[in-house]
Amino acid sequence: MSTADANAHGAVPDEAVGLDVQDHVDVAHYETIGEPYVDNAKMSARNVNVYYADKQAIMDVSLDIGENEVLSMIGPSGCGKSTFLRSLNRMNDIIPICEVKGDIRLDGEDIYGSDQDTVLLRARVGMVFQKPNPFPKTIYENVAYGPRIHGLAHSKAEMDEIVETSLRRASLWDEVKDVLEQPGTGLSGGQQQRLCIARAIAVSPEVILMDEPCSALDPIATARIEELIDELKERFTIAIVTHSMQQAARVSQRTAYFHLGKLIEVGDTKQIFTMPRHELTENYITGRFG
Ligand SMILES: Nc1ncnc2c1ncn2[C@@H]1O[C@H](COP(=O)(O)OP(=O)(O)OP(=O)(O)O)[C@@H](O)[C@H]1O
């Protein structure tokens, strides 16, 4: 029996599953259960290890994100979901003590290669954060900023077109088309988050990373973002970190469960939530810890 099978069949000690003792599970040698790889990978991570100085936050994670899929990443607080997500567009580079090891590819191209331009990479792999963070500029300028620095528009008409298309795709155009010169910060929280999504879309990304994009929003604003995610996957590949299992179940096709820096289980979202194979996954989704 492999380590993975042993884990799946209850080799995790009983005392490892309580609310207060999850930190004591020694996950370092666990193998991922499920299928981390897909045929149509847009991004692929292999043997990724991430450190903050001496502390290891991600342990040997291998995972694909399939083209035009929504992959959700779930797990207890501190399990490394955001750290892994940030590795996918080199946002961790801005944390001096953070070191990423392993291989991460976008369309087969090594994103940590010495010739990679991180500004261009972050346009191709955009990010939406937990707290809506519009620039202190007009609604129009929030969306136009990225296309301008990347030279994507050659005239005012072209820029107008990009701004309108991005706001339409972010499902915000009808609400703001008459107030484009007003500050983005004056919008409601949900509108601000859709503005941030429009800003990410405006530079024509291929992948959008979302780090708990709804955690600061009310249920109605959350529902709108979830609908939007469903529409966006027609054009983009999306990876989302969420604390809401209902949200993961609603928006994603595949779900990855992390625990103490390890990718414990990954698979079809329905299977993860109805028939988890690993005891740690089951304990988390049934609310025994998290
Ligand atoms: N900038 C940092 N410096 C040092 N340690 C960090 C830093 N960011 C995260 N960590 C540590 O790395 C580990 C993983 O953190 P991370 O934020 O990735 O987890 P998470 O699963 O996203 O947590 P949460 O659900 O609470 O947001 C934690 O132990 C955390 O304390």
Image (tube, rainbow, N blue to C red):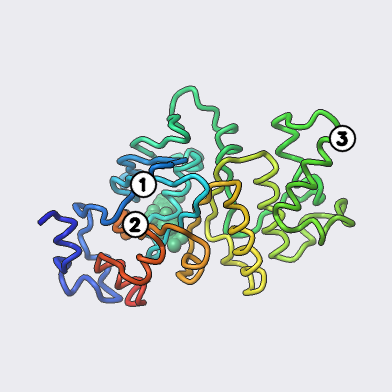
Q: Nearer the viewer, residue 154 or 12?
A: 154
How packed is label 2: few (under 14 Cα within 10 Å), some, or many (20 or more)?
many
From the Cβ of disc 2, is ligand 1 less than 8 Å away? no
Q: Could you say whether the residue bearing mark 2 is in a helix, strand or loop? A: strand
Which circle marks residue 63 in the picture?
Answer: 1
- From the top left corner, tell me how far across and down residue 194 is, in percent: 69, 57
The residue under label 3 is which amino acid type?
Lys
The disc, 2 or 3, on the residue closer to the chain's N-terminal end is: 3
Residue 30 position, x and y percent, is 21, 55
Q: Within 10 Å of the Cα at label 1, are there few (<14), some (14-19), or many (20+) other Cα atoms?
A: many
User: Is label 2 in contact with label 1 (beta carbons under 8 Å)?
Assistant: yes
- Above or below: residue 119 compared with residue 236: above
Q: Residue at x 40, y 37 (%)?
A: 104
The residue under label 3 is: 156
Q: Residue furthest left?
A: 1
Q: Amino acid at mark 1?
A: Leu
The structure residue drawn at horizontal position 10% and vertical position 56%, both measured from the top left corner, is: 1
Q: Secondary structure at mark 1?
A: strand
Q: Earlier in the sequence, mark 1 or mark 3?
A: 1
Q: Nearer the viewer, mark 2 or mark 3?
A: 2
The amino acid marked with disc number 2 is Val
In terms of image quadrants, where is residue 9? bottom left
Label 3: few (<14), some (14–19) or many (≥20) C-alpha neighbours in 10 Å: few
| Residue at 59 percent of width and 33 percent of height | 119
